[in-house]
Amino acid sequence: MATKLNRLPPIVVVLGATGAGKSKLALEIAQHFKGEVISADAMQMYKGLDIVTNKVTPEERKLVPHHLIDFLDPLSKCTVIDFRNKVSTKLVRLFLKPD
């Protein structure tokens, strides 16, 4: 009997230079495949830095679920290990949620 973890959906990673349109492409891919976006932008995780980071708008975030955006106070620190742990937890929850 196969478990849900044995039939995981593909993960699409969008990489590129600043200002290359990664967020827009990620949104289009997520809409097409009925997926979700997990941001790996080190600055977009901070609340209130919308203009500085060219963060996706609240309207864009309503189109598909977005994760790890606006969850951290700008005066807090988040190490790579902290971020990895948050992403790992989020991935497990997404993969195990009912279809």
Image: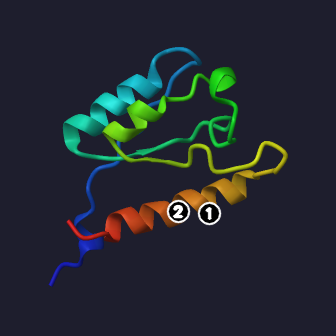
Marking on residue 50: none
Question: Where residue 6 appears, x then y in whole percent?
Answer: 25, 71
Left or right relative to 15: residue 53: right
Mark carried by residue 85: 1
State the residue at coordinates (20%, 35%): 32
- In the rendered structure, the answer to whether residue 76 lies left or right of residue 7 reads right
| Distance CA(mark 2)–CA(mark 1) | 5 Å
Q: How was this image coloured?
A: rainbow
Residue type indicated by callout 1:
Asn
Residue 78 place in picture, x, y as percent: 76, 52
SS at mark 1?
helix
How many numbered marks are there?
2
User: CB under 8 Å between callouts 2 and 1?
Assistant: yes
Q: In this view, does 53 lie above or below 83?
A: above
Mark number displayed over residue 88: 2
The amino acid sitting under disc 2 is Ser
The quarter of the image holding the N terminus is bottom left
Q: Where is residue 79 in the image (x, y as percent from the top left)?
A: 76, 52
